[in-house]
Image (spheres, grey):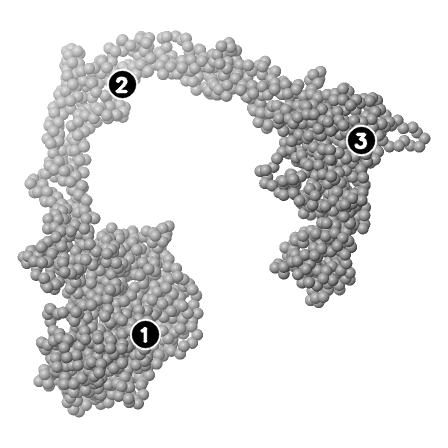
Amino acid sequence: MQTVSPPNSLRGSPSRRGRSPRTPAQGSASRSSDALLTEFSNKQPATFTSCLSIPVEGAVPIASQEEISSPSQPGMPQQNTSNSTKRAPRKSKTHALAALQNHVSSLDNDDVAQPELSDEFSGGGTPISVSPTLDLSSVKTSSPRTQPTRSKPRPFGLEDCLVFYPTSDEFRDPMAYIRTISEKAGKYGICKIIPPVGWKMPFVTDSEAFRFKTRLQRLNSIEASSRAKVNFLEQLYRFHKQQGNPRVSVPTINHKPLDLWLLRKEVQKLGGYEAVTKNKKWGDLGALLGYRGIPGLSTQIKNSYTRVILPYEHFCDRVRNSPILSTSPNVARDPQLKTHMNIQTVTHPLTSPRERGSPPSSPLTSTSSPLSEPSDDGDYKERSGPRQDSSAAKRSSRVASQEVTPTGKSLEPASRLSPGSASPQPDDEYKRTLELSCEICQKKNQDEKMLLCDGCDCGFHIFCLDPPLATIPKGQWFCHICLFGTGGDFGFDEGEEHSLSSFQARDLEFRRRWWTSHPPPSPSAADLNDPTVNCIGNTLISEYDVENEFWRLVQSPNETVEIEYGADVHSTTHGSAMPTLETHPLEPASKDSWNLNNMPILPDSLLRYIKSDISGMTVPWTYVGMVFSTFCWHNEDHYTYSINFMHWGETKTWYGIPGEDADKFEAAIKSEAPDLFEAQSDLLFQLVTLMNPKRLTDAGVRVYACNQRAGEFVITFPKAYHAGFNHGFNFNEAVNFALPDWLPFGRDCVQRYREHKKLPVFSHDELLVTITQQSQSIKTALWLESSLKEMTERELAARQLYRDRGVSERLEEEDRPEDQYQCTVCKAFCYLSQVVCHCTSEIVCVDHMDQLCGHSPEELTLRKRFSDTDLRDILGKVVERAAIPGAWRAKLRKVLMESDLPQLRSLRGLLAEGERINYSLPELPSLRKCVNRGNEWLDAANTFIMRKQSRKRSRRSRGRPPLHEANNTAFDDRDPGDRPDRGLDDLYTLLKEVQTLGFDAPEIGTLRALAEKAEDIRRKATALLGSTNSVVSRDAYKAECERLLLDASSVNVHLDEILEVETIVSREQFIRELEEKAEDSSATLEDIRGLLTRAQACSIPLENKFIRTLESRQRAGDEWEERARHLLDQPHKTIEGLDEFFEMDSTIPIDVTVYDRLMSARSKAKDFEKQAKSWISPDGQGPKPKVSEVMRFVGRAEKDFSIPAIRDLKQTAEFALDLENRCESILQNRYRHKEDTDIFEMMRKWRSYAREHLTMFSLPIFEKLDDQLTRHQEWLEDLPWYCSQHECAHGRDILNDVEESTRPEDDQPPNDEYFTCICTTPVRPPPPGTRSDAVQCDHCFARFHGVCAANGGSCPFCDHHHWNGAIHKERSWHFCFLPTILLKAPDITRNYSDAWKQLEIIVHRIDRLCTVIGSFLTYASQPGNQRVEYIPQVRHYMRKLYKIQFAVSPSREVSYGLDLAGLHRILAGQPPAVRVKKRRRPKFTFGQDIDKNWLDGTRCICRGRTPYLLNYPTVECDLCSRLYHAGCVFFPIEANASGNNRFMCPLCCLRRNRPYIYSEVRVKHVDNQDPETYVNTSAMLDTFSKDILYTKMLPPYTQTLFVELIRFSPGQPELSGGSTPTPRSAPIPVMPRSAEPGPSTHHRHSHIHSTPIALPTPPTPVYELARQPSTNGHHVPPPPPWSTPWESVTPSPLPPRVQAQEQSRAQSPHLNKKRKYVDGSPQDNSEPRSPKQRRLPQTPVLPSANIGVRAMQQALSPSLAMIVSPVDTEPSPRRAPSIPPPYARPPSSSSLKSMNGECSSVKSVKLLVGNHK
C-alpha cells in the first residue's frame, strides 16, 4: 500500500514507490490467494494443455491492444518485466492459487521454489505446413438423412429435441414451415431441420483469402461454480493481507484441504454462521463436504470457518451497512472530482457507458481478457463493439452492456490511457495527487493523509475509513469496491489469426494428440460407416465420447485445456459463405429462401422492417470451430428466433431450454454462483458462463439436446436459452429472424434490458411504427394491434406524467440518429419521446427524468417524435383494419340469425365483400359454396323464366319437323331453335330442389306460377286434340289451334301436346303453299328441296301430283349441280367449258351459289384472255409492260385456267426474261462466252431478235446493252487502225511492233559495234568474195543495209523528213490521241473487247517509252551534257520509234523523233571526248591478311590468340570466304538460325567503305600507338587519298572491333588531260548506294557491255533500292536514269553515268583484277524530302534555238540522198503543254510491272525526295 505525500516527505507521498498512481498495481496481488494453499501433494498434479503450443503455418499472433495503443515513449523508463503489473490470464483454480502463493513468497524474499505448470503439448517443433486453400474433400460436407440410432443414452440422460424432415413443397416457404412447427418445436426450445433430398447450399467463401481471429477458451474457467470459487478465494486473500495476515493458510482435515468456498456456500444455505451454530449443524456440514468418521470434525470445521471466513463476512456486512462507505449514487457530486462515481461515468470514445455505481474491474484481473462478447445464433454473437457513426441511422453490429474493444481488451478510462503513465516523475505525480479527493468526504485537504487504492487509484483519508486507520498500511491496499469486484472482468483472450487450412491443421493435430494421450475408457465399436464415429489416429471416437470428455474437462479442477474458437466472424467484413445477389448474381442459391442472407428480409420476417443492417442479426455471422470449443448459455438478442446452418465439418452439440423455463434456468444458475451475479447482475448477457445440464435438470429445468451435422439447420425459439460445443473443425453460419408471435417476447426483452441497463440492438417501438408505415394489410393489423395498443397506452401515460410535472413539449417529425434518443441511465431507446435539457446533450426516459441534470422539471423539454393525435391515428387505423374481419363475421351472423331462409341476394353481397377483404376468412369457403350452389339453381330457373334469343339448336336434334317460312304470324314469331326444350318434370324437380338449399329468392314464386300456367295449357291442348272428329269446320278447328299455340308461346315450357297441335296447323298451311309453288319457275334448287323435306315431315303422300312435279324438277337440278361442281373442281378451267353454263333452260332449278361461282370464273377467264391478247398484239398506244409484271400475270392466270393466249404470252415473256438475264450478266461482267463466234457478233444478233420479236415488252437492261453496243461500235471506228472495209480493228501487227520496241530490258543500246542501221539487224561485213550492199551516212558515218537505205533515200538518223511526215508512212497518227480513246471505251468494250486490251497494252508501253525518252532528252538536251558517247543511245531510241512508225510524244506539238534527230546531228558533229585517266582507290593490308589460318581454319579478328575459342561456332564471309568466330565478330547465330546467314566481314566492309552492322570497327596503324588516334579509312577511300588520314575518337561505348593496319597502298585521284582532279564534293548527281549487292542485268543481256555511255542520274526523286548479293560478288549498277520521272538538272562537267560505268568497270573482276578490293558504288549525297514535296517532271526542254542552230550548223554534213538546209535542221522551239504529259503522270500498274521486270534484282523501293542544288 502506498500513500500520497509532498515530494519531500518520506511516507504518504503520491509517488507510488516506482509506479504511477494511474497504473493498477496488480503484480503482487495477482497471485494472492496462493497463501491459502497448504498441502497439495496428495492431490492430482495440475496440468495445462493449450492448442497454441501446436505451431502451424499461417497462424499469426494477434497484437494486444496495449501494444497497439500504448507504445513506449522515448525517455520514459520501462518497468521491469519481471515485476510487470500485468498478470497472465488464469488457467484454473489451482493455477491461480499457485501463482498467488509464489508471488507472496517472492515479496517476502522466501526461497520457496515456484511450482511450474507446463503445457503438455509444448515443445516447439517444426510448424505444420498447410495448403493456402482448404480442400473441401477433407471435411464432411453432407450427412445421412436418416438419423443413426443411439446405442447408449446421451450423457446426463438428456432427451433429444424434435427433428423435422420437410418435403420439397413444405421446404419452399421457410417462414410458413417454421410457423407450422413452432407450436410443437417451441416446447423444446430448439429443433433440427434436415433439408429434403437434392437441396444443397453451395459454399462460396474463398478459403485462400478468408482469414479470421479466434478467442481462447479455458474450459474449466467457463463453468459458473469454478469461477465463483476462484473469485472468492482471491477476495479472501486480499482481505486477510490488508488485515496484516498475509500468511493465513487453508485448513486441512485428515490431510485433505478444506474447500472454503463450498463450506461458505453450504453455511449460507443453512442460514449463516449464527444459524448453523445455534442448530448445531457443523457436523452435518462435514458429511456435505465429504468428511466421514473423523473425530472432532464439527469443531475443526467451525474453527476453520471462524478463523478464515467469518472475519471477511463481518467486513462485508460492515461495508454494506456503513452509511459512509455505501454512498448513494443519487448524491450530487462535483463532476471535476476524481471519485469512484466519476471514474465509472467517464467513458472512452469507443466504448459504451458503464452502469453507474457498478464496481470497476478488479485490479488483480485487469489484464485478464475482458468479455469478448461471445454471441451466436447458435454460437457466440458479439453484442459488443462501438456503435458505428452515431450521426448515421445505421447499426453495423450488435451492441451490449459491456465495454470491450474490437480486440476484446477492456479500455481504461480516458484519464488513465496516457502512454507515459507507467513511470511518471515525482513532480508530475504530486500534481496529479492534488486533483484527488476523498471518496468518502469528497474533500481534497490533508494530502499527506490521502491513501490511494492500488486497484482504482481513488483516494481515501485514512481517518475516513470504517474502521479508521492509524497509519499508512504496508504493501498493497485495495478499497472495498475493488476488493468485492475481484473476478468481475472475466472473459476470453484473443487467440491467433488463421486461415481455414491452418485452423484445420491445428484442430486435427490437437485431436490426434489429445485422443492418443486420453483414449476413451470404453472404445466404440469399429463401424466406420457410422457417422457418429470418427477414426482419429488409431482410436475410434464416438460423439458420446466427445460429449463426455467435454463436460469432464469443464468440471476438472486440475486439468486445464485451452482451445481456440473462431466465433462471430462478421460476414459484412469477410463475406457470407452463402452466395448473395451482389457476389453471385447468376447462382440460383443466391435467391433461395433458406439462404441466410435472405431469411431476415423474407416477407413474413419482422426484422425486414428494421431500417438498417445489423451485423449478426439481420446480416449473418460465421463460426469456425475446433474440438471442445464452446458457446455458453444465452438467449438471442431481443428474444428473437435464430437459425444456424452447418456448411461442413464435424458435429456440433446443442443444448436448449424452452422459453417457458427461462426463469427457472436463471434462478438455478444464480443459486449455483450467487456471488457472480451479485457482482455482475448482467452476467448471463456476457455469454461466458456454462452450467452442467445435470444440475439444471436437478433444479427442475427442462434441457434438450441435438447433434447438428453438415448440411443441417438448427432453429432456436424466442427466449430459449441454448449452449453447446463443437466436436471438431466445422463451419457454421447463423442469423436472426422474427415471426409475428415474437412481438410479446420482444417487448419483455426490452424491459429486461432496461432493468439490467443493457444496450438494446434496435428500438422496439420504432420497429412497430415502421411496420405500420410499410405494411397496411389486415393480416399485419391483427397481430400488431395488441402490441401497438400497449405501446400507445404506455407512451401516452408517460407523457401525462411529464405534463403533470410541468415539462414543456416540442414536436420533431424527423428521425434522429439512435444515440440521440437513447436513455443515458437505462440505455433504453426512447424513440417516441425523450427528456432533454439545454445544459447537456444527454437524454433520459420518463423514469430517469430526475437524473438528467440539476434543473427543475419546468426547465426540461419533452421532445416528441409523434404527437398524441398522430399516435392515436396510427393506432386507430390499425385497429380499424384489424376489425374488418370481425365486422364481416358480424354481418354474416346477423343475416343468418334474421331468417331461416336468408335472401340469396344478401348472401351474394356478403360473399363479394368477404372476397374483397385481403385476409383469409374461415367462413368464406362455406359461404362461397352455398352462393355458388344457389347461383346454379337460379341459372336453371331462368331457363324457364327468361327466353334466350341467342340459343341455337338443331331442329332435327329435338325431333320436330320444320314449320313454314313466314306465313304463320299467329304464333311462330321466334326462331325454332329458341323453343323450350325442358318440360314440366324438369320444372317440378327445380321446385323440389330449392326446398333443400336453404335460401329464398323471388324466382321461386315466379317458377311456381309458371308451372300452374303450363298445366292449364296442357289441359286445353289435350281437350283440343281429343275433339278432332267432333269439329264441324276445319277452318274453325285450325283457328282454335292457332289461338292455343299463341298462348303456349308465352310459356317457356316444353309440352308434347303443343307439338301435336303445331303439327296439325303446319300440315294445313303447307298444303296450301304447295299448290302455289309447285310450278313456280323462279324457285331455286334449295327451295325445291325445302318443300320436299317439309312435305315428308307433314306426311304428304308421294302420289300427290305436286310432289311428283317437285321431284322431277329436283332431279334436273341435281344433274345440273353435279356437272357444275365437276367443272369448278377442275384445276384448270377452259373458257369453252364455262360458256356451256352461260345459256341454259330456265325451268331447271339451280343452286344460285354455284351459278354465281361459274359466272365469276367465266368473267375472270375472259379478262385474262383479253389482257393477254392486248399484250401480244399491242396497238402502240399504252405503256409497255415489264417482263416481271407479265410473268406474274401469267402465273395468276395459269393457276385456275387453261387459255391459249396465256400460253403464247408466257412463251414470249420467257424469251424476253432470258434476254434480260443475259444482258444483265453481260453488263455486270459475269457472262462466260462459250461459243466460237465473236461475243459482239452474238450480242448484235440478240439486238436484231429483240427489235424484231420483243418490242411489246419494256426491256430496260437490254436497252442499256443496246446503248453500250452502239457506243462500242463508235469507239472501234475511232481507232486509227480501224478498217471500215472489214468493219474491224487490225491492231495485232501494231501491238507486236510496240511490244518489240518497248521491252524494258531493251532500254540500253546493244554493245555490238555493227548495230548501226535503223533496223534491229547488225550491218556485218559480207563473207569473203561477196559484195556488200551497205551504205554509209556522210554526216554520222552510220552504215545501213541497202534495203533500209532505200526506204526514204536518206539517213533516218540525220534527215528529219523521216520524222516530220514528209515521207509517207502507213501509220501516220500521233500517240497522244490513244490514251483519250482508251478512256472513252464503254464498259462492255473494256470487259470483252480484244481491241481494247491491245490498245491498253500499247498505251501503257508507249507511255513508259515516252517517260524514258523524255527523261533522256531532258538531260541530254542541255549543252553541258551533249556528248558523243550518247550517240548509240540516241540511235537506239530512234530505231524503236522508226519501227513503231506513228509519232510518239506526250503532246501533239512535240515529236520525240524530231528531237532525237536534232540531238543526233548535234552529237555527231562534235569532236571526240578527251580520255579520262582512271582513278585508283587506296588499298589496305590488315593484320589478318598476313596471318595464317588457325587450327580450326579461321583467320579471325582474335588472330588465334584466345585458345578457348577453338572450335567455337564460325561464320563465313560472302566476299572473301574467310571464316570468323561468330562471337568475335558479334554475329548472332541464334537470330539467324533459319539459314539466311548472309555475312560480310569487318575487313571487307572497311575496304568497301560500308558500315559493319553488328558493331563499330576501328583501325589502328601499326606505327601509331596513340590510344585515341585511329585511321579514317572512310575518308581515304572517298578522297582516293595518297596519305594515311587519322582521326581522334572517344573511348568506345558500345560493341567495338579493333583492326590493325599493316601496310597501305596509296590511291590515285582522277585526272583529265593533266588537269587537277575533280573534288568529290562537286555537285555531281549520283545514284544512291544499295543496301545489299544484287545480280546485275549485265549478266542477263550480253549486249550491255558496249562503249560506255554516260546517262543522267536523277537529282531530286531518288529510289532507295535494297539489293541482294549477286553470285559473282560484285554489285549491280543502278537502273537507267530515264526509267523514272526527272526534273530538269543543272549541267555538270562530267556525266555521272560515265563515272559510275568507269567505277563499275574498274571493280569488275573480268576487267581489272587489280581493283579487286575497290568498291565503285557511288554515295547519294542528296537530302531526302517528304513524299508530299515530290514534284512531277515537266516536259523535256531542249537547248534554246540560237544555241541549237549554231551547234547544228557546225555539225551538219550532206547525207546519202539530200543536203539538209540549215532551216530544216533547226529544231523548232516549243512551249510546255498546259497539262502534264502522259509520261509525267504516275506510271500505271502495267508500267510498274514493266519497271519491276526491268530490274529483277530490286527487292524493295522507297521513294526519297532531295533538294538538289
Q: Residues within 10 Å of mark 2 (few under 14, many from 20)?
A: some
Residue at label 1? 562
Does residue 1299 appear left or right of residue 855 in this picture?
right
Q: Of the residues under marks 3 and 1, which one precedes in the sequence?
A: 1
The residue positioned 42% from the left and 63% from the top of the image is 133
Q: In which quadrant of the rendered image does the C terminus lie?
A: top right
Q: CA distance from mark 3 to mark 1?
A: 122 Å
Question: In this rendering, is residue 274 above or below 1663?
Answer: below
* Along the viewing direction, whichever of 692 and 69 lies nearer the viewer: 69
State the residue position of label 3. Answer: 1468
Nearest-to-viewer mark from 2 and 3? 3
Residue 634 visible in this rendered orientation of the protein:
no
The residue under label 2 is 1097
Query: Is any part of residue 1003 visible from this angle?
Result: yes
| SS for callout 1 | strand
Amino acid at dot 2: Ala
Tell me, yes or no, whether the two marked residues, 2 and 3, touch with CB atoms within 8 Å.
no
Viewer-proximal residue among 1351 and 1266: 1351
Q: Which-is-in-front pick, marks 1 and 2?
A: 1
Residue density around tag 1, few if under 14, some if 14–19, many if 20 or more, within 10 Å: many
Residue 625 left/right relative to 970 = right
Q: Does label 1 or label 2 sit earlier along the sequence?
A: 1
Q: Residue at x 80, y 27 (%)?
A: 1756
Q: CA distance from mark 2 to mark 3?
A: 136 Å
Question: How far is disc 1 from disc 2 in space, using C-alphas?
Answer: 110 Å
